[in-house]
Each structure stands twice: as C-alpha cells, then as structure tokens.
Amino acid sequence: MKSANPLPFAGMAVLCLGAVGIAVALQYGMDMQPCPWCILQRVIFLGIAVFALLGLLWRGAAGQWIASLGALALALSGVAAASWQHFVAASSASCDLTLADRITSALKLDALWPEVFTAYASCRDAAVDLVGLPFEFYSFALYVLIAVGSVLLMRRG
C-alpha cells in the first residue's frame, strides 16, 4: 500500500461502532428486541471495528493489507448473515440452534455483556421495518459499503 492514510480505517471503525450503538439504542429506546442473527451482526460489526483499529495502529503495508482483508472477510460474512436473516430466518418462528445461535452462544458474550449480546426475540418477532425498510437491510448496505471500501484499500497498494 502506498499511503498509510488513517482516515478510511477511522471511518470504518466509527461506522461499525455507530451501527452497534444505534442497534442497542433502538433495542432499549424503541423496544426492538434482537434475535440471534441480530446479535451475530453486532459481533461482526465489532470484529470489523477491531480490524479497522488494527489498520489505524499498524501503518505498514502488511498491516494495512491484513486489516483490509480481515474487514473484507467479516463484511462478506455480514452480508451473508443479513441476507439469511431477511430471506430465511425472518419467516422462522425460532432461531434456536441456528448457526447464529451456536456462534453467539459459543462466544459467551451474552454472559460478559448481556445488555448488548443477549437475544430476546425470535427471528420472526425481530423482523421489523425502520422507515419503510427491513432493519437488516441497513446492516446489509453498511456491510457492502465496508466490503467495497476494504477492496479499494487492498487495491491501493
């Protein structure tokens, strides 16, 4: 990578932390309770933020490339999770024992910070619209934006 401009990684971290903050604010402010797929997407956003912070701290070409690759991999995972939530899980009465439920349970984040990482709703109950769009579409769009940005960062060098 030619330049170690920290701005793209700082923006990526702010977007991801903001997305989780907004989700938690809507959970408590508008009673939009999360399902396991929602929680998994929070975890993915936080993982991307970690890679973005790595890109901020590790300014060398290798660090920038690794941070971009990690963010890209997680963003693509987020695209898959948001798509699955919308097209499959939202019509399911239960999210128990789904991939999202297994991953979030294995990470045990619900025991560490239950206010943020505990699923309180079924996938069907969590399928809500926000300003006319399914809530998971906002996550989907943000994941796509992060994926494109990550590819551009990788191609920069």
Image (cartoon, grey):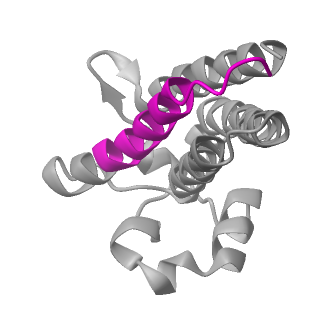
- Quick check: is 59 in the magenta stretch? no
Q: Main secondary structure of the magenta part?
A: helix
Q: Residue furthest left?
A: 29
- Left/right of residue 8 with respect to residue 155 in the rendered view: left
Q: Nearer the viewer, residue 82 or 13?
A: 13
Look at 40% across and 38% down and name the residue there. 14
Look at 59% across and 18% down and name the residue there. 145
Where is 102 relative to 39, above or below? below
| Magenta residues, start to end | 1-23
Look at 62% across and 47% down and name the residue there. 92
Can you give x and y, in whole percent of width and height, for residue 135 in the image? Answer: 41, 31
- Quick check: is 4 in the magenta stretch? yes
Where is 90 relative to 132, above or below? below
- Left/right of residue 63 with respect to residue 16 in the rendered view: right
Residue 129's image quarter? top left
Q: Quadrant of the N terminus?
A: top right
Can you give x and y, in whole percent of width and height, for residue 122 in the image? Answer: 49, 57
Where is 38 relative to 148, above or below? below
Residue 89's image quarter? top right
Q: Nearer the viewer, residue 98 or 137?
A: 137
Can you give x and y, in whole percent of width and height, for residue 117 in the image? Answer: 46, 68
Can you give x and y, in whole percent of width and height, for residue 56 in the image? Answer: 57, 42
Q: Quadrant of the C terminus?
A: top right
